[in-house]
Image (cartoon, grey):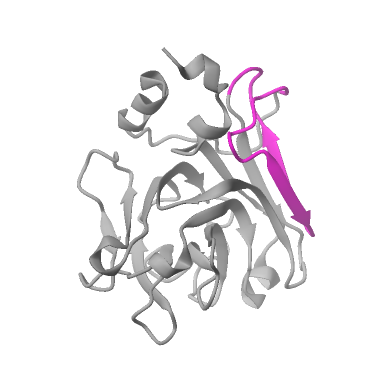
Amino acid sequence: MSIKLLSRWFVSAVLVCAGGVLRAQSCLPPQPFVHSFQNLGVAALQGAADAPCALSSSLNSAAGPNAAAFVHYRRPVPTTSVRYSFCMDSTAIAPFLTTATRQVQLFSASAANPGDAPHMLQVILYGQAAGTVLRMYAACASQASHLCSVNQLLTQNVNVLRFEINVGAGTAGSVRYWVNADFTDPPTGVDDNHGTGLDNAASGGVIAAELGLSSATPLFRTYNNGAAVVFDQIQTSDDVLFWQNFELDQQ
């Protein structure tokens, strides 16, 4: 596996990402997120020629409950350890993210064996008086709801977000996350059922992932005016599997 490709996970976080719709064409899709889904919304990949694309995701004004606009991919086999990273600019929707009832999903990683927890991880954005909040739901066998969650306050609208999903029995199962920090730094927080572990092995690992806007609450849809959230610097440890020709990776 290419050392050059793996090394990009250890560069410093850049706290600047695309702040609007980029005009240039012929950008490179953010591997491996090469498929899109759009229903009463728009998922547009745009950027400079031969550069990685940014994703501009928006829902139509007064859209219905099934409105969604995201990019996604599916793995050939599930994985038990994977990382995701992206820069999110939520400036355009921040004015109406003022209460916890105005929520929208930003990211999810699907479980290979859904059972009672169809997702290994869901990342939700919602509002409150102090600022916007990330809520992370993770598959968690020991809870009656089969979910464990943590909240993280965001103090600005542009943030680099990183997630690491680890699948295993007992304390081996966890979700770690970083806000405006590198993977080499101590995590900003951990979703591990207060130290007892997610015990998420029965979920079978991550089989698919999506990035964009979906599962918006009624009040989010009511106040939404078609404004876009922009995702840039989209990376995952999966991209070396999907992007590279394996012959080129062999040294």
Q: What residue do we see at 56% from left, 63% from top? A: 105
Q: Is residue 32 above or below residue 1?
A: below
User: Outermost residue toward the bottom?
Assistant: 144
Q: Is residue 8 above or below residue 200?
A: above
Q: What residue do we see at 58% from left, 27% from top? A: 52
Percent x, y of residue 57: 66, 49
Quadrant, the N terminus: top left
Quadrant, the C terminus: top left
In the rendered image, residue 26 lying in the magenta stretch gets the answer: yes
Q: Is residue 60 above or below residue 146?
A: above
Q: Which residues are magenta?
A: 25-51
In the rendered image, residue 238 lying in the magenta stretch gets the answer: no
Q: Can residue 42 be seen at all in this image of the molecule?
A: no
Q: What residue do we see at 35% from left, 68% from top? A: 151
Q: Can residue 161 be seen at all in this image of the molecule?
A: yes
Quarter of the image where one finds residue 196? bottom left
